[in-house]
Image (cartoon, rainbow, N blue to C red):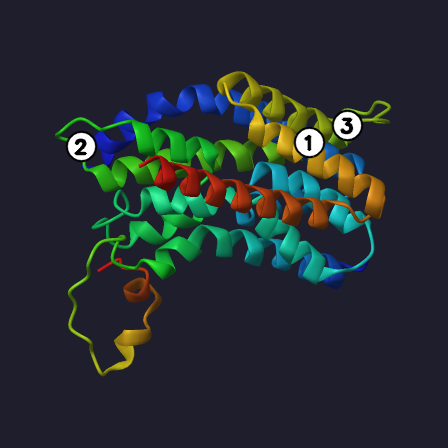
């Protein structure tokens, strides 16, 4: 049963493996270039397992000690998981103990595969989703560890490598921009960030910007619902 | 930042991330629909697996 589930899950994770290994290696290399030992990227990528937040954690570890800020930042950056979780409430039903790991290991890519792919009838759905999640996490942790190990061997001027995080977010933003016709949410995010950057400065603008974005979406959604009700 | 402070920072990030993942399942342990369960008076009422709706 497990073997069949693994064989069914593996092909779906190959494209993810390519991206995860490369990006994970960049993350491991970045951590090494900042002076952290190989254990940091290995353990962080295993326990946090949220790509964008791991890149943000590099800066958190290099700035002043503020665990409360780190906690709320993690809540904000990973807030999308709340919506993933709501979508997976039914899918993760009746899978036994695997449910704990499926929730813990949920990332954008695992969510996409588990949400959209229906395994063959002879394959156990729980084990299929388990292996998709496990393989994706293994690629990411493996990539990060490999990148950090390479950091010990390969030596070159790493000045500016931290820009990989900015590049990652710019690519994610462009990807979302291209995928949707309505750019209201992207423009809201951009506008709120610029406004908070001007008001609070570059060192303190992230949390207020995120709070303002959530507030804008909340008001926008309420208005939308109100207009729909009036239309009916 | 000392090693202890680094570990505490990482734990704070882990806690925030795990909370975002588990919260919907803690709010809707039955999967969002109506749940019919026998309320036990024993310790198993507080078992995390049960709270998450694993059974």
At a point 51% along the width and 20% down the height, the residue shown is A18
Sort mark 1 into few (<14), some (14-19) or many (20+) by Cα contacts within 10 Å. Answer: some
Q: Are marks 2 and 1 on the same chain?
A: yes
Res A123 visible: yes
- Percent from the top left, x then y, of residue A117? 28, 27
Mark 1 — residue?
A: A190
Q: Quadrant of residue A173?
A: top right
Horizontal arrangement in the rendering, residue A17 relative to residue A70 (left or right): left
Residues B33 and A114: in front is B33
Mark 2 — residue?
A: A123
Which residue occupies the extreme bottom position in the image? B41
Sort mark 3 into few (<14), some (14-19) or many (20+) by Cα contacts within 10 Å. Answer: few
Q: Please state which of the two labelled residues, at mark 1 or mark 3, is closer to the viewer.
A: 1
Q: Are marks 1 and 3 on the same chain?
A: yes
Q: Quadrant of residue B46?
A: bottom left
Horizontal arrangement in the rendering, residue A26 relative to residue B30 (left or right): right
Mark 3 — residue?
A: A163
Residues B22 and A57: in front is B22
- Percent from the top left, x then y, of residue A181? 50, 18
Quadrant where the image shows the C terminus of chain A: top left
- Dot 1 or dot 3, earlier in sequence: 3
Q: Gap between marks 2 and 3, in whole Å? A: 43 Å
Chain of the residue displaying label 3? A
Q: Please state which of the two labelled residues, at mark 2 or mark 3, is closer to the viewer.
A: 3
- Percent from the top left, x then y, of residue B5? 75, 62
């Amino acid at each position: 049963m497990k073997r069949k589930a693994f064989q069914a899950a593996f092909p779906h994770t190959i494209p993810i493996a390519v991206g995860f290994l490369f990006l994970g290696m960049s993350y491991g290399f970045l951590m090494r270039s900042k002076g952290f030992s190989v254990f940091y990227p290995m353990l962080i990528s295993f326990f946090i397992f949220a790509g964008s937040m791991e890149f943000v954690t590099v800066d958190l570890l290099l700035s002043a000690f503020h665990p409360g800020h780190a906690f709320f930042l993690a809540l904000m950056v990973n807030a999308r998981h709340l919506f993933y979780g709501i979508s997976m409430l039914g899918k993760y039903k009746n899978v036994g103990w695997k449910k704990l790991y499926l929730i813990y290991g949920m990332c954008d890519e695992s969510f996409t595969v588990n949400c959209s792919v229906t395994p063959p009838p002879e394959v156990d759905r729980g084990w299929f989703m388990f292996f998709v999640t496990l393989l994706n996490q293994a690629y990411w942790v493996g990539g990060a560890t490999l990148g950090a190990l390479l950091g010990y061997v390969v030596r070159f001027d790493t000045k500016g490598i931290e820009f990989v995080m900015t590049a990652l977010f710019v690519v994610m933003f462009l990807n979302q921009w291209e995928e949707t016709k309505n750019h209201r949410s992207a423009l809201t995010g951009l506008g709120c960030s610029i406004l908070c950057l001007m008001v609070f400065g570059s060192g303190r603008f992230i949390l207020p910007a995120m709070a303002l974005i959530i507030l804008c979406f909340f008001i926008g959604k309420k208005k939308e619902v109100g207009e729909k009700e009036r239309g009916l | 930042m000392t090693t202890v402070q680094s570990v505490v920072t990482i734990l704070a990030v882990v806690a925030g991330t795990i909370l975002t993942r588990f919260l919907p399942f803690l709010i809707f342990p039955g999967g969002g629909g109506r749940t019919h369960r026998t309320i036990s008076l024993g310790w198993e009422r507080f078992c995390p697996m049960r709270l998450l709706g694993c059974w």
